[in-house]
Image (cartoon, coloured by chain):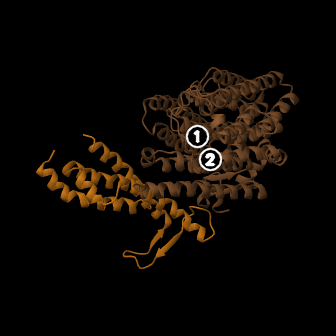
Amino acid sequence: MNLLPVLPILIPLFTASSMLVAWRSRRLHRVLGAAGALCNLAAAIALFAAVEREGIVVLRLGNWPAPFGIVFVADLFAAILVAASAVVGAAVAVYSLGGMDPERESFGYYPLLHILLMGVSGAFLSGDIFNLYVWFEVMLIASFVLLALGGEKEQMEGAIKYVTLNLVSSAIFLAAVGILYGTAGTLNLADLAVKLREVDNPGLLNALAMLFLVAFGIKAAIFPLFFWLPASYHTPHVAVSAVLAGLLTKVGVYALIRVFTLLFVRDPAFTHGLILGLAGVTMITGVLGAAAQSDFRRILSFHIVSQIGYMVMGLGLLSPLALAGAIYFTVHNIMAKTNLFLVSGIVQRDSGRLSLADLGGLYKDRPALSALFLIPALSLAGVPPLSGFFGKLALVRAGLELRSYPIVAAALAVSLLTLFSMTKIWAEAFWKPSPMPEAEGRRRDPAPATLYAPVIAMAAVTVAMGLWAEPAFALAQRAAAQLSDPAGYIRAVLGGGP
Amino acid sequence: MSSLILRTATRFVFPLLLLFSVFLLVRGHNEPGGGFAGGLVASAAFSLVVIAYGTDVARKSLRARPVSLIGAGLLVAAGSGLWALLRGEPFLTGQWTTIERFPGGPADLGTPLLFDIGVLLTVLGVVLNIVFSFAEEE
């Protein structure tokens, strides 16, 4: 256990650094990009297996004891998300082999992708709130460049909005960390959980909670702070969209869940009540925004917002079942959403466009691709037996148990509207006859296997999560149990004594 | 801009600055200094060459691409943490050895120095990457 918890950070770091040393060799970048991501996947699965077997794994860097040194903590929740993000990383790295253009590759696409992965894993594993901030920055700086890479006019517009809002969010985050340090005198998450119990100033704690809610809320794209997301996610290269859509907002959700289960649990009627309300509005605005769009990737972008609502809903309800539902739903969403973006990339490659009005006839031309679209799309809409159904089922049941009927009604209505959006894409892009004359901007040759393999693999994960929902959900419940009872986390980090 | 005085001075100052950078690096062990400051001083030396002789000469005297320096620095810094694993200790634990016959008394040598060398290389690479691209823009 001296290395394993930092391997999902070190492997992308070593991969990216090696690519920097051999900057000119595009071929080496491609080989390393895929190989490094696959190694990272193996390490993440090994970490997950270790956590699953032995409980919370803690690594004290440089052998300095917590709370003085820097710790990396892998509980089940973090390990599950690290594994899921490693799956996304590997899928996107392989997908990029066939889908990335040479210009972006020679401007350092692969090193940036790996630095982004490093930031994401670091954020999940950090046991210290200042380090969480640093990992957020690592991830954001990589994502800024990835968003702007290519330099098209539309991209710049999206990137500027994205950068500005995220800088605001980081500033708020840092200010909140400063106040927190002034209040509790520590930045170690476990130590904070202990110290904040003794802070006799509920007003200050709630103010801090709100600062963190805004900071992470911008990153997670909850209402009313989501508008940067639909403005920027449809502009970059589709592989970049896929990895950003799959991972970035979820890191925000992770941070929200971590902070609001470990630190700010003293006044749940206020904080979690507010979060629950925001969750409902986030779902509804996201799905209504999507209904008004007519571009493949814009619809998907708005749906990210609406799906974030479900994850935050689990946090707002705060029962173990609701948290388990949120965890299960997050993993489901990482897989399904990334996959839909990857499918949209193949659609764009084959037909040269992504506007729904111009698309059509894909079902006739590409039946296999259509099936691969349907799996994540129906899963997103919550059609059984796919993974989205079970996530929503758990959340709705938790809502009913706690008698939060408005949020349950919102969740069910949004689910229906999601199905509407997905059928809209299906009917327009796949089902209706092609409005364009044959052979205009269209490619007859089928996409290479490197594009299809990741899509198939992720679809398989979605199906497996649905078919083996019981063990998968049991796992989410164990992760939720660790979150609901922070004592285990605190003991693992700080040891037996106080 | 090509001034004879600056060019001549650069010939003398350049090695001094590099020496000073190494001095800062080693001094950073126990006193103010370290890889970051050393890296900045080293990049100041190369920036001086850029001003006096232009980027072509500076790139040639650097011998490696700045981007490669960043990568190498990160590899060295992260690699220095792996040493601890051989002893069965957590990642990044400092590993020390004492050189008894060091001129002027025994000296401690450890992996933090290696980490600092990595920091120096990374800082040098980052700064020169920026300086070179600004200087070449005109």
The residue at the point 60 percent across, 50 percent down is A449
Under tag 2, what secondary structure?
helix
* Residue A46: % across, % down: 69, 59
What chain does mark 2 sit on?
A
Could you tell me if residue B34 is visible in this image? no
Give the answer, above or below, for where A377 lies relative to A32: above
Relative height, residue A192 to residue A422 (above, below): below
- Colour chosen for chain B: orange
Q: How far apart are marks 2 and 1 (CA)?
A: 8 Å
Q: Name the residue under label 1.
A: A346
Q: Are discs 2 and 1 located on one and the same chain? A: yes
Circles 2 and 1: CB atoms closer than 8 Å: yes
The answer to whether any part of residue A151 appears in the image is yes
The residue nearer to you, when weighing A81 against A481, is A81
Q: Which amino acid does label 1 sit on?
A: Ile
Q: Residue A452 carries which label?
A: 2
